[in-house]
Amino acid sequence: MRAQAVGNVLTVVLALAVDRPLSPSAALALFAAFLVGGAWATVLTIGIWRIYPNRPATRAVAENWRRLAALARDLIDLTAADGVDASRWEAHARGHRRTVRDGLEDARAVIMASVRSPGPVSPESARALLGLEAAEQVFGALIALSDRLESTRDPVLRGAGLRVLRRLRPSLVLLGQDLGHVSDRVEPSLVRMQADGEEAPALERIVKVLVDRLRLAFGLKREQGRPDPPERRSRSAALKQRLQQLRGTLSWDSAILRHAIRAAVLIMAAVAVTLAWWTPYAHWLTITVALTMQPYFAATWQRALERIGGTVLGAAIGGGLAFVPPTPLNHAALLIPLCILGFSVRQVSYGAYIACLTPLTVLLFEVAEPGHSEWTVAAWRTFYTIGGGGLAVLACMVLWPSWEPDRTEGELARALKAHSDYARAVFDVLSGDAPPRRLDEARRQAGLASNNLEASLSRALQEPRRRRSRRLETLLAADAALRRLGGGVLALHFDPAARTDVGEETWQAWRRWLPAALAGLAERRSGLGRRPEAPPTSTLDRLGRGVELLDRLLTRQPLQGG
């Protein structure tokens, strides 16, 4: 996506360069203006007024940790009080649980907005999403803990719960701070918290979830603000990986390759049209084609609608500037708010950004080349934008189309295979047959596969020709089930008692069955085989039920092209 952004900018520059012949001195002046403008933008966004596009997501997650700390503080007061006052517990649940739930949903919306923005998912957004999931599970564990403490009069259990909460709250407060530093005293506190939970068997599993999720959250916080460390690989390994990526990109099945060829054909045609029927505004056709066309039809369709709608609205506003006296002071008074408003809404709505950019373009055209009517400039920009957007959509439909639901089923098969590898790695690591670093890579690949599946589902939902069919509903349900199953595999990694609870023979049966069942679903093999026994409500039992749910979903709607 970064390469595509660079290519789009280069296309715009070339479209402006071939717009009309210039003298050497004029060309040099324009070149210098581009350099100065780019340098000033770099200094402004990096040195003077730094931009942190992922800061809202990080702050939203931190706010939820603060809300959980407030919940824990109130729970401490209730547990420490003598007697059981049902009305106070009810008020606690009503006051805190709704607040935390609303905060979690608001944070999820903020994070998903950053994930869905153009370009690849950043490491900061991925960490924020993982942190939100950890907060979600801590919230659930706290609800379970409050339920146990409310319903018991056992002083041992209440005492253990009170000690757990008193150790928990400082950790939640620390996670709620907008800082990347984490004290070295955190881990000993978590160990003592787990020991307190072991004193009361009724709380042991709940406290274990709390400790595991806090360890994950603190690990993410340590990484906050740090650049991702480069992978230490040999030159031959790095070269091999790049060659594999290149072969994948140059395959005809690659949406990127087809997009590149499609874009080259259409942009060459647009440039030919602008040179054959030249006007001072004709370069907007090439620019619109380059900036509207995306590798996937759904993204192109959405971008075309937003760009055309924003241009029509902005053209109406830009035409109205004809009623403003064209003085330098008026131009400056209009340029500043239009720039601030336009670039402020860029990440919120592309259509709103274009609606602000169009009158700004009309105004700059008037400043650069006085004498052109604002209504004329606005009309021509609208005409070329509608034409370029329509051509981009038509090209995606006619020139080597790739409909997203077909690709989504392939992504689901790859996600199932990645989770099969992840489950196998967890069993191997817990059995002592593989190093822990293998687990980290398997978890990362499973997460990436799930992200790719959800991105494909999002594009499929945006396609105008899509119907609300059972096929797409099945894929959505399977994605949700796979996410839950991935969480269960992660929980298994943090559950060392799972092996001893079932015995060695049953453990080895699960070790064979779970990865094979997921791989069979990915390869569309019928039949999962007999599921091994496991204690009810255990992690293994939940994983088995998750696989069976996936089997029922995918048997009802078999995968295609996996």
Image: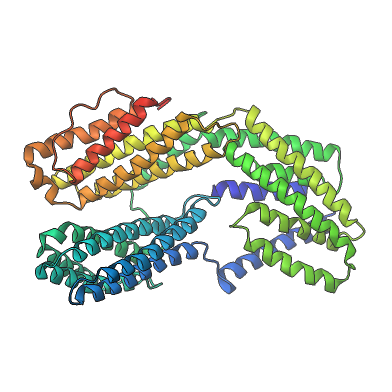
427 left or right of 56?
A: left
Disc tally is 0
Point 85% across, 56% down: residue: 319
The figure's colour scheme reads rainbow
Task: Tell me where residue 184 sits by quadrant.
Answer: bottom left
* Residue 517 percent location from the top left of the image: 25, 31
317 left or right of 491?
A: right
* Residue 330 percent location from the top left of the image: 84, 71
Task: Tell me where residue 474 sits by quadrant.
Answer: top left
Point 23% across, 58% down: residue: 209
Q: In this view, does 474 lie above or below 375?
A: above
Camera-nearest residue between 100 and 310: 100
* Residue 122 percent location from the top left of the image: 46, 55
Q: Is residue 266 above or below residue 176?
A: above
Q: Which residue lies furthest to the right in this view?
A: 371
Q: In this view, does 134 lie above or below 162?
A: above
Q: Is residue 460 visible?
A: yes
**Quadrant placement of the C terminus:** top left
* Residue 253 percent location from the top left of the image: 50, 29
Point 43% across, 38% down: residue: 476
385 left or right of 125?
A: right
Camera-nearest residue between 137 and 126: 137
Q: Can residue 185 be seen in this view?
A: no
